[in-house]
Structures are given as C-alpha cells and as structure tokens.
Image: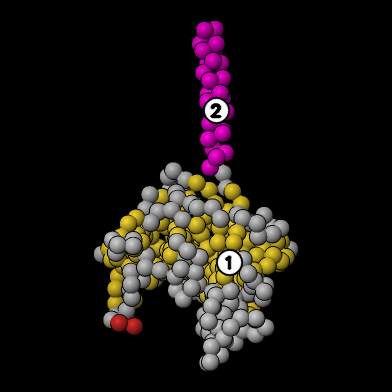
Amino acid sequence: MRWARALAVAVLASVGAMAAEKPRAAAEDWRPLFDGRDLSGWDTWLGIPHPSVQGLDRPRNAEGRYTEPLGLNVDPKHVFTVVSTDGAPAIRISGEIFGALTSRDELDDFHVRLEFKWGEKKWPPKAEVARDSGLLYYAVGEQGGADNKTWMRSLECQIQEHDTGDLWAVGGTSADVAVETTGEGKERRAVYTRGAPVVTMAGDARRAIKAFDAENPTGSWNTVEVVCLRGTCVHAVNGRVNLVLTRPQQPGPDGARSPLTKGRIQIQSEGAEVYYRNIAVRRISEFPKAYAP
C-alpha cells in the first residue's frame, strides 16, 4: 500500500502546485479597456479640424482654415461616443475630426486585442478614399505632438480598408522590418516578407506594407491584435500574422535615437466612421504560440 499512499501524496502535491499557480495566471488574464458603459480610462484628443467642419467656436485664418487643435477631452461634435450596434455596446468614432482615444495606462510587454467594423460616413479630406483609422502603440510624448498636432509619437498598426496590418512610424519613430522593396520615390513599396533583407522604416520611408490582406468585407467585424515583447512586435488580423517588426526607436532631444518599448495606445479618428468593441489587453512574458515571430 506504500505505493498507493505515495501516489496520493504526489497527486495532492500536483493539485497544490496548480492551485499555487492560479494567482500568477490570473495576473496575465485579459483586462478590458472598454467596459461597455462609458469611456472611463481613456482621454480624447482632437486635432485641427478640416475647414469643412461647421458649428465650432474656434478661430480661423483669412483662408477659412482653423488655426488650433480642439485639444484634450474637448469633443463638441461628439466624435467619440458609446452606442449599441449588433446588439452589443461599442465605441463609435465618427471620423469627422482627426484625433484619437488615448489609454491612460502605459504598456510595455503586452498583447492588445480589439474588434472593429466600418460605418458608412466619410469626411473631408478623406471622403473619396479608403476608410481609415489605426491602432497606435508605444505612444509617448505630448498629446498632438506629431503629424500636424494630431497624434502622439508612436508606432501604428494601420486599420484601413485592405491595408489593415501595415506599419507606419509616427512622429519620427522607426522600426526594422524584413521587406521586399520595389519602385522608387512615390512608387516605392516595401512589403513585409519573412526572410527578406531587414530595412529600417523611418522618415519618408516609414511605411511597411503587410504581407497579405486578411480583412473581412467592409461592414463585417474584424479582430486586430498587436503583440509586443522586448522590442519585437507582431501585427495580426483575424488571427493571421501579417507583419513583424523589431528594434522600435524614437528620437531624443539631442538627435540620438533610443529604444521605444513602452507607452500608451491610441485609437484614431481619421475621416471615416468606425466602431470598436471588445478592447482588452494582457501582460505577457512570452509570445503566444500562434503569434510567435
């Protein structure tokens, strides 16, 4: 019977070890960034409105252009609202004025996940082009400190019709991406290709195009994920990895570049009506198997 007692002790020890691990696992569980009720936990920022925007008590110059951003948590046109769509709460971003929702927490090694779908409305100056938004991460510096007082310095996982998953380096940031490059000047295309030469995306060449289009038809819900760990970031659309970057950096005041591996996230308003829901984040210490670079 000694072997039976030994087996029982081993089983109890195993159960105890599993129970002891539960608090550690719980710390890595998904944490919602949108509770379905309001925008608590987020700040809003709206940049300089397009001249076509009416009903704003803001100065314009002699050409009729607005001269300053609306700024922090000022949203007279209700660009950011909580609505019900498809039977569930969602954040509606009208797109009428360029700007962003900004998380109040900073993230370093993280896995962020959200769902989006396009609405119907589009606004100048993007009324005649593809619907556009974006998930900015590692966002640092001042609100409106980049791109015509609109975004924060950051990296962008592009959310745009048929371009979802592209990388844009925003506000002077940079990152390394394995790309196949064709064309010159405005015709230049740098497409993420596993095993291709690694190129630093920065300055005038700050866009890396995703490997393939994984977006569902316009009007359908899509899942976008960004997974970042120790300076490597993965973009995934509907469960499929379509871009990987490494060595994200930012400029310093002396011109030298330094690693960019921590910051807030922003969800863009950029000329198109779009809905977001099921926004959540978790801390990670290793890449999930499905998204290992």
Choose top left, top right, bottom left or bottom right for residue 27. Answer: top right
Residue segment shown in magenta: 1-28
Q: Residues within 10 Å of mark 2 (few under 14, many from 20)?
A: few
Q: Is residue 254 left or right of residue 161?
A: left
Residue occupying the point 58% across, 53% down: 280
Mark identifier at residue 157: none
If you read the primary sequence from the N terminus, does the residue marked by circle 2 or circle 1 appear first? 2
Residue occupying the point 45% across, 50% down: 108
Q: Secondary structure at mark 1?
A: strand
Choose top left, top right, bottom left or bottom right for residue 201. Answer: bottom left
Is residue 233 among the parts visible in the rendering?
A: yes
Residue 282 location in percent, x, y?
53, 48
- Total tally of numbered discs in the picture: 2
**Figure quadrant of the N terminus:** top right
Residue occupying the point 65% across, 85% down: 54
Residue occupying the point 45% across, 60% down: 140
Choose top left, top right, bottom left or bottom right for residue 115. Answer: bottom right
Q: Which residue is mark 2?
A: 20
Work out whether residue 189 or residue 271 is closer to the camera in this orientation and state it: 271
Q: Disc 2 and disc 1: Cα gap in Å?
A: 44 Å
Residue 118 location in percent, x, y?
60, 73
On whether residue 158 falls in the magenta region, the answer is no
What colour-coding does the image apply? secondary structure
Q: Which residue is mark 1?
A: 72
**Mark 2 or 1, which is nearer the eye?**
1
Principal SS element in the magenta part?
helix
Residue 136 location in percent, x, y?
48, 64
